[in-house]
Amino acid sequence: MKKKLLQGAVGLVLTIFFVWLILRRLDLHAVATAIGAARPGLLLAALATFLAGYGCRVARWRIMLAAHNGALRWRDCAGPLFASVAANNVLPFRMGDIIRSFGFCKQLGVSQGVSITTLFVERLLDLLMVLLFLAGALAFFPGGDLVKWSGLAPILAVAALSLLLIHPTLFDYFATLAARLVRRLAPRFGALLTREVHRSVETITHVSSARTMAVLIVWSFLAWACEGLVFWLCACALPALDATSGAWLALPVGTLATIIPSAPGFIGTFDFFVAQAMTQSGNTPAAAAAFAVLVHLMLWIPPTVLGGAYLLSHPVRGLMRFGPNEQ
């Protein structure tokens, strides 16, 4: 409990810090004016694209769950997924992930182990896509040789993650070999690394075959392409933005920033780094901040409203009774 409270306190402090970084030397009137001038038609297009992207996420999750309950339909999975996102947006400690892992297992007809596994694989797939989009953005981002060479890091990470997802046993061989080398230098850390490697491989193998994983990667790409279009359409909706293409850099940068501890909904951390990406792309600080606020609302409001409505109509009871070994 003390650890959770400490994490919450750190997240709150970092949220306040990044909000302060955003607000200092910022013309709030210019930000409000830029948001007020947003084109409604493009915002509606962004909303439709957002929902299409989440439709892809639901389809991806249904494929993973269908390996253990073939009777599941798309609509059976949509509510729990939106509910978990809504809970993460308003509750601390990523409670949405806990609700999704344990709260809907009986309703979906799967074990808690399967539910946790699918969440783990989903995170890997999302990380793969974010790094892929980051590599693509850095390839076209004007920043000299340093930026061009830095683009190699996400490319190498994408290659490693792809290998892990599509051929987990091949990855197991090389990762175990590396872990053995580490054990010679640091036995305790090497033993821990070996266990985690085997656990990751077993988790991925448990979900699906290589062919199914390839389908999951396609659905993941479509989901993140839609999210990228949400960023771009929100940028196009703001007349104050000069370089709307910066939205494609803001997508991976802002998403990776959510790793930093913060208040629920990633307030402050997401906004600061999205605004920085747009500023570096050639936009004014006020326009960049307006874009960060607008795209954050577009990503926050729809799933929170839809997921919140589902939680109210399908309340999760007795969550604390769930344990990791319950089937």
Image (cartoon, grey):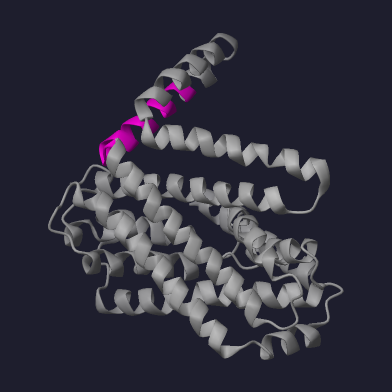
Residue at far right of view = 25
Q: Position of residue 314 (x, y in %)?
A: 25, 74
Q: Is 224 placed above or below 229 here?
A: above
Q: Is residue 312 left or right of residue 196?
A: left
At x 65%, y 66%, the residue is: 247
Q: Is residue 39 visible?
A: yes
At x 74%, y 70%, the residue is: 243
Residue at far top of view = 184
Q: Is 27 placed above or below 280 here?
A: below
Is 40 a magenta residue? Answer: no
- Give the image quarter of residue 231: bottom right
Nearest the camera: 188 or 40? 40
Nearest the camera: 85 or 275? 275
Q: Position of residue 313 (x, y in %)?
A: 26, 79
Q: Position of residue 218 (x, y in %)?
A: 39, 51
At x 59%, y 34%, the residue is: 156
**Chain part drawn in magenta:** 193-209
Q: Position of residue 48 (x, y in %)?
A: 44, 78
Prevailing secondary structure class for the magenta stretch in the rendered image: helix
Q: Is residue 113 left or right of residue 296?
A: left
Is 208 a magenta residue? Answer: yes
At x 27%, y 72%, the residue is: 315
- Give the image quarter of residue 197: top left
- Give the image quarter of residue 302: bottom left
Q: Is 247 placed above or below 174 here?
A: below
Q: Is residue 92 visible?
A: no
Q: Is 157 placed above or below 46 here?
A: above
Residue at far front of view = 140
